[in-house]
Image: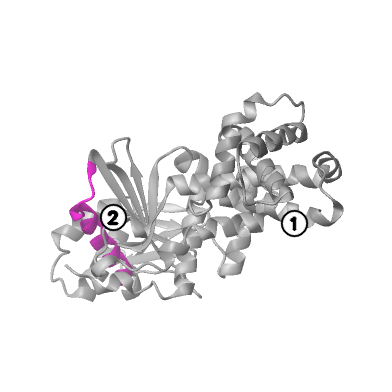
Amino acid sequence: MVDKTVNAGVGAQQGFDLQRNMALFIILDNFNDKFKGNKYFLSLEHLEDIIFCFINDIGESTHIDTYQSKKKSTGNWTVNQDLAVVVAKILETGGKLISDPYPKAKNYQHALHFSSNAIMHFTKSVAQKKPLKPIPFSEIINDQNLISSFPSLNIHIQSAIKDSIIKKYKYGDSLPKELEQELENLKFLFVDMTKTSKEQENQLEGKLSSIFGNKINDKKAAIETLFSLFNKIGLTYNQKNIARLNDKSKRVESDEVENALDIITTKSKAFDYWRKEERNISRKLQIRPFEKENFELMFYSAFDFFKSNQEAEHQRIITFVKENYLSCQGCDEEECISELFVLFNNTNNTTFEVMNLKAVLYAAYFETIYKTEVKN
């Protein structure tokens, strides 16, 4: 069935920013335990606000986590009609995942998250024969209790949530079977994110620091590199208004995330070395004072260009370095770069000027010798 709502949020930049920030927050918050070394892809505004699809070695989905990401300017989430609308949509997503043609492993499972940076305080008062005073029941999902599954909630709170959906959509006496069965997969998640996009960016920088420490010296630039992964899917509409998991135009792949983190950490290590040893490097590579600024720019930007299929010259140079760096006889980086510079000029033609070639060779050398270290 064509669902015209699947594109409803694509033009809403503020909503997309929240989902992008939330997706990165989830990755960084669970990086070592869940994401590092695993194969997955993520999608935004596609079947659900955020989808993480984990894949086995033969390309089957083993597990999918979806997140309906909602912010609240004031107050808490309570059991009311607003909550009913959100939860009903989340439960419908479970059915869509099952019917989606993307291949699934025999042990496939999915979890459907209602995530928010606002506290969820669910209450229900139950009348009693004796004493006459109703008994209150309460469940709170907050920074002290980050996640609760629907089955773990008090039975009276469960009934209150189900009744609110039934009343909102006039289902009669009970939920439709396809929604009822998805309640087992429903989870309520408090994400301790700040309210504004700018504050969220600062928070993400802090997450990077906690994971990578001094491997990243420019956290703001690192966040911008990660944000760039989402530019394509932020502007891509679902084909023919039909959301499908196999629509690659709506994906960010785990390999892309890993490559971006490689760029960030390798670039940071290399640039930190340049800043500490600028005088010695310039002398040994014969970089004149008025060339330093341009060398620095070419050196720093080369790491991004190595990942782009549009930059053929950069691709050719890094391939050359990977094939020849082990034959270098020098005892420091600059001596090795000088050897590679001579060898490259003797065996290749290039459109780069001398100083630019040295900068790209230097970046390629760092990329080659430190990448294995970054992944460990």
Instruction: In this rendered view, identify the residue nearer to me: 213 or 351.
Output: 351
Is residue 128 something one can see in this rendering? no
Residue 38: image location, x then y, percent: 42, 39
Q: Residue at x 39, y 41 (%)?
A: 39
Q: Residue at x 15, y 71 (%)?
A: 171
Q: Which residue is drawn at 70% across and 47% down?
A: 359
The circle on residue 373 is none
In the picture, residue 330 is in which quadrant?
top right
Q: Residue at x 25, y 74 (%)?
A: 4
In the picture, residue 109 is in which quadrant?
top left
- Which of the two discs, 1 and 2, labels the residue nearer the N terminus? 2
Is 268 one of the magenta-colored residues?
no
Residue 243: image location, x then y, percent: 27, 63
Q: In the displayed structure, does residue 334 sit left or right of residue 371?
A: right
| Spatial separation of the CA atoms under disc 1 and disc 2 | 44 Å
Query: Which image quarter is the C terminus in?
Result: top right
Instruction: In this rendered view, identify the residue nearer to me: 202 or 155.
Output: 202
Do the residues bearing badges 1 and 2 touch, measured as CB atoms within 8 Å?
A: no
Amino acid carrying mark 1 in the image:
Asn
Query: Which image quarter is the N terminus in?
Result: bottom left
Is 92 one of the magenta-colored residues?
yes
The circle on residue 294 is 1
Q: Mark 2 points at which residue?
A: 245
Amino acid carrying mark 2 in the image:
Leu
Residue 113: image location, x then y, percent: 36, 56
Residue 255: image location, x then y, percent: 45, 45
Is residue 7 something one can see in this rendering? yes
**Quick one: SS at disc 1?**
helix
Start-end of magenta stretch: 84-104
**Quick one: SS at disc 2?**
loop
